[in-house]
Amino acid sequence: MTRSFTIYPAVDVQGGRAVRLVEGDPARETVYFEDPCDAAAHWVRLGARDLHVVDLDAALGRGSNRDVIRALTRRVAAESPETVRVELGGGVRDLETAHAWLSLVHRVVLGTAAVTNPQMVEHLVAEFGADRVAVTVDIKDGMVAVRGWTDVTDVTAVMLAERMAALGVRHLIVTDVSRDGTLQGVDPEPVKAVRAAFPHTLVAGGGVARDADLDTYEALGLDGAIVGRALYEGTVRYPRTA
């Protein structure tokens, strides 16, 4: 069966604005839209039916952009008569927060909680179904990074992927932190290893610079890619053409 390949435009929110960071460093930001609602609407008008939204301040434990992201979901619904699936990550580390977001978005993305509280992941999958819960495997120096990529654990990407599959997770995101926001191009090796360990939906991000990087991911059997800076700066075409 031929897999479909989805590009997820990224809308990262810091200080109420749509930005991209270099290697996850909050001090190295580029602002692309003053209002994240405008960023989301831009991609929806171009045909996006899947958006990857991250609350960077919540991920770093220094605040929340909840009101802005609530407004973003309303704007997305107003922009398109078709269903647009918004997935939300950043600071989703307890059931109360997950429940609040799942009343507004299609899917929550768990990172730190997958390492520190796997029971929470299992609970959410059982309660809401596997399509509404994703886990992000953020790789830094070969190991999984948590808490907004500020802490590096002793867990490998493959270990975490296998653990999550055993808990019923069917949507995994793997991000190469060292390349995120750099336009350096992708390193296929970490993704290959996770693809071999995780037979379900696998999406990658970090370093996409050109259409050839998407071809690389597609050739590895991935289901999609999260793309930020390359889309905003036009080095990757959107919508993608054959």
Image (spheres, grey):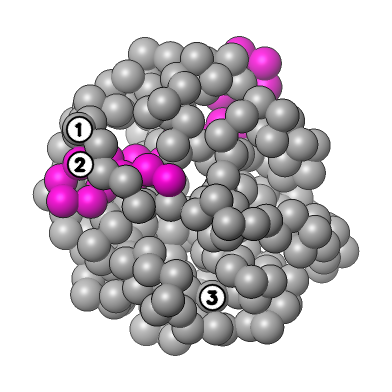
Q: Are marks 3 and 2 in contact (CB under 8 Å)?
A: no
Q: Earlier in the sequence, mark 1 or mark 3?
A: 3
Q: Is residue 146 magenta?
A: yes
Task: Answer whether residue 141 is visible to the viewer in this image.
Answer: yes
What stretch of residues is rendered in magenta? 126-147
Circle 1 residue: 154
The quarter of the displayed image where residue 181 is located: bottom left
Q: Are marks 2 and 1 in contact (CB under 8 Å)?
A: yes
Res. 143 mark: 2
- 222 up-or-down from 133: above or below: below
Mark 1 and mark 3: span between their CA atoms?
Answer: 30 Å
Task: Give the residue at x 68% y 83%.
Answer: 34
Circle 3 residue: 19
Q: Earlier in the sequence, mark 3 or mark 2?
A: 3
Q: Are marks 1 and 3 in contact (CB under 8 Å)?
A: no
Q: Earlier in the sequence, mark 2 or mark 1?
A: 2
Mark 2 and mark 1: span between their CA atoms?
Answer: 6 Å
